[in-house]
Image (tube, coloured by chain):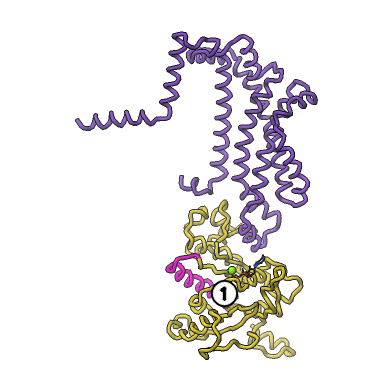
Amino acid sequence: MVAPTGSSRSLLSRLGTSHWVSPLALLVLWEAASRIGLIPARTLAAPSTVAGTLFAMIVSGELPSNLLVSFQRVLLGLSIGITAGVVLALIAGLSRRGEAAVDPVMQIKRTIPTLALTPLFIVWFGIGELPKVALIAFASTFPVYLNLYSGIRSVDPRLIEGARSFGLSQAQLIRHVILPGAMPSLLVGLRYSLSIAILVLVVAEQINASAGLGYLINNARDFLRTDIIVVCLMVYAMLGLGADWLVRLIERRALVWRPSMVDA
Amino acid sequence: MDARLNFIDPAEPPVSVPPPVVRLRGFVRSFGETTVLHGLDLDIRPGEFVALLGRSGSGKTTLLRTLAGLDAADGQDVRVPNSRAVVFQDARLLPWKKVWRNVALGLGGADIRDRAQAALREVGLGHRLDAWPLTLSGGEAQRVALARALVREPKLLLLDEPFAALDALTRLRMHDLVLDLWRAHQPAVLMVTHDVDEAIALADRVLVLDAGRIAAQERISIARGERGDLTQPLRHKLLDILGGTPASSGVIPFPQGGHL
Ligand SMILES: Nc1ncnc2c1ncn2[C@@H]1O[C@H](COP(=O)(O)OP(=O)(O)O)[C@@H](O)[C@H]1O
Ligand SMILES: [Mg+2]
């Protein structure tokens, strides 16, 4: 007699504290409001419609092909941006002369919001792929640069000294002490770069795109297809989640030595 | 070996004492306006265990850093052996390298893992070869630091308050370990400490650093196992010197010049 009561109460309390309950409730409310006409389809499509559209777009290949285009833009922009950020941070972090040459320029660059450069980039690079990739690259450079640079500079000097007392050369110091010591900071920078890259992607894709998620959204807007817009928003969100997951995966491999990782 | 050398080279006067591994003459070290070490003379013989006492800020670490080659000696009369190793108060293990890689840091060759393992076995940590440093206790980390120093077979082992951060029981165990390692490898040791008892328990010779010079030194000839009560007068003497009280008790005025 006691056991069922206990388990049902724990089920109830588990329901009360679960994180997916409130989003699910919202979804149900939204669906209901759409069904009774409280939310017209041209304002916001019902969740069931969105799900149907998503399925149809996947089957027709419309979504995968455009997603691929967007994905390539992010990937290319990020590769360029991260590479530039890492190289610049190494130059500035590992030598005083490099710091004098690189850091002031980077600090000036930081004051300019990347998206404000969009008009200029269109003038310079036209309206094809180039300005989109350039914007993503430009925006994702800085977080990696800033974090890696300060990470290099804040490696515990006692560790450097300890290693130096065993006769390590400068190159060995960089390889065994400074770069691994700056790794956690690099990963923080990487995380920021990834999310900024996706943010910039959304805006950059509004530049007269003929393919990609932004193109789908622009088209849908012209035809008041809110269901397609919501599908694309979901895909953007998935991209963001995927980026986060990727960084966490890298962290788990690169920072195995950390106590939190060690305990796990 | 020295005796035989003397046979080969009769011009050499018959010396029973081998040349010192560490030799400083009139060493001066200043930071800006303040002179920390002020005409300091120091000799350490091969295999000798020397403890360096001194108040906080008296320049013990500064002297040790010079001997370690971490600070340039700017052409002063400083002689130290090429093979040196330092153990700091904090173990300074690289947290991103496994224990054995920390021990092998900077070593070359195919057998470095074996060498690291042998050194870790000596300090009783042969089973923690692949552990991450952040999972070690303070005493274990310090033992790894000792292994890392000894794997290089240094002629001079420099210890900067190596046990200050450890609890009393662990510290006593570390004393035994250090003595065992010292007997096995026979490096000259300079151990900085602010603990008079530690200095007396371990060293052949105790130096007191004050006002930038070696202000006093005591050689301890009593065997290490029997030092307990016999060294009480010495203990008081050293504490007096460190306390900076005038030698009113008549125990010991500083040997003038504090020379070796
Ligand atoms: N890099 C430095 N720059 C300026 N002053 C220093 C530096 N290193 C040590 N000192 C000074 O030299 C004195 C001796 O320091 P230290 O050798 O660390 O003392 P101890 O190890 O005996 O406690 C202190 O007054 C300290 O402030
Ligand atoms: Mg000190």
Q: Is residue B131 magenta?
A: no
The relative height of residue A55 versus residue B71 in the rendered view (above or below) is above
Magenta span: predominant SS is: helix
List x then y, in percent, for residue B34.
69, 71
List x then y, in percent, for residue A87.
72, 42
User: Ligand 1 closer than 8 Å to the CB at disc 1?
Assistant: yes
> At 51% from the left edge and 9% from the top edge, which residue is drawn?
A40
Q: Is residue B183 magenta?
A: yes
Q: Label 1 is placed on what type of residue?
A: Arg
Left or right: B239 in relation to A1: right
The relative height of residue A74 versus residue A96 in the rendered view (above or below) is above
> At 63% from the left edge and 16% from the top edge, which residue is drawn?
A216
The residue that mark 1 highlights is B55
Query: Which tint was used for chain B?
Result: yellow
Q: Which chain is purple?
A: A
Q: Is residue B260 visible?
A: no
Figure quadrant, ligand 2? bottom right
**Displayed quadrant of residue B253:** bottom right
Q: Dot 1: within a 10 Å radius of its alpha carbon, few (fewer than 14), some, or many (20 or more) residues? A: some
Tag 1, which chain? B
The boundaries of the magenta stretch are B165-187
Q: Quadrant of the N terminus of chain A?
A: top left
In front: A245, or A116? A116
